[in-house]
Amino acid sequence: MIDWSCIDTVLLDMDGTLLDLHFDNFFWSEHLPRTYALRHQISKEESSAYLYGECGAEQGTLQWYSLDHWSQRLDLDIAALKRELQHMISARPFAIEFLTQLHHSHRDVVMVTNAHRKTLEIKMDNVNITHWFDRVVVSHDLLAPKEEQDFWHRLQQLHPFDPSRTLLIDDTEQVLASAQQYGIAHLLTLLQPDSQRQKRIDTRFRGIHHFDEIMPEGPQR
């Protein structure tokens, strides 16, 4: 599926790619609506409908990924609520083995995440994978989400890479489409970002189930 001899730079998403998306989906669809319902003395159904409308209106924007934004908007400590579920954070199958192989190759390995810094800290307190990367890039630091072209231009200015020899693996198709528009040549998605939800069968981009399907080969560092 991948000709590793053509890849110099590997860009990897975090949530839904390296980490199981079940934590995030459960938080936003179950834990937060239940907490918000209790706070405002409304039904969970009313809470879910309200939050779905509020969140949906900003999907794909930088604010949508900001814990500070939602803490202020909902008058809740979102980071603290996420820590209540931190035991649910887990790496996807073969993610560590994949990162290990990449780390020992000649390639530049970069985490590119839309996750808020506070979210990143919570995740890495439980499943620390940052030491496998040459660098970690957070979209909030670049003032643009991966769905926007500005992110890729600013990433290029910060850490130059050759798009024709770059692989991006991400579970969000809008992100992959944005990367494709920028010129990144090698794109893969995940067919089951959330281990508790059904496997996707209608992805626009080529997909893998687990990383053991694409273990890299190549010269050692």
Image (cartoon, grey):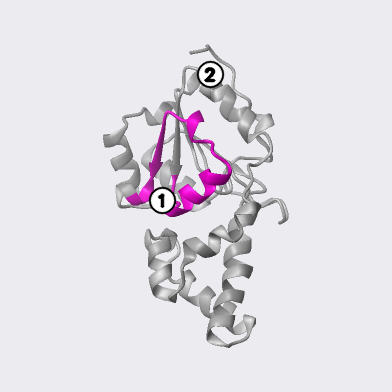
Circles 1, 2 touching at the beta carbon (< 8 Å): no
> Is residue 83 toward the left or the right of residue 198 in the image?
left
Disc 1/disc 2 C-alpha distance (Å): 27 Å
Give percent across and percent down for residue 87.
Answer: 64, 52
The one nearer the camera, 184 or 79, is 79
Q: Secondary structure at mark 1?
A: helix
The one nearer the camera, 109 or 184, is 109
Which residue in the rendered view is the most extreme toward the left? Answer: 157
The residue that disc 1 covers is: 117
Q: Residues within 10 Å of mark 2 (few under 14, many from 20)?
A: some
Residue shown at 43%/75% (left/top)? Answer: 75
Q: Quadrant of residue 61?
A: bottom left
Q: Please state, as top left, top right, bottom left or bottom right, where the N terminus lies in the image.
A: top right
- What kind of residue is marked 2? His
Residue 154 vs 174, above or below: the answer is: above
The residue that disc 2 covers is: 104
- What kind of residue is marked 1? Arg
Give percent across and percent down for residue 108.
Answer: 43, 25
Q: Which residues are magenta?
A: 113-140
Q: Is residue 116 visible?
A: no
Q: Is residue 184 magenta?
A: no
Give percent across and percent down for residue 174.
Answer: 48, 53
Q: Secondary structure at mark 2?
A: loop
Give percent across and percent down for residue 132.
Answer: 51, 29
Q: Earlier in the sequence, mark 1 or mark 2?
A: 2
Residue shown at 55%/58% (left/top)? Answer: 83
The one nearer the camera, 50 or 75, is 75
> Is residue 198 toward the left or the right of residue 73 in the image?
right
Q: Is residue 178 visible?
A: yes
Residue 48 vs 179, above or below: the answer is: below
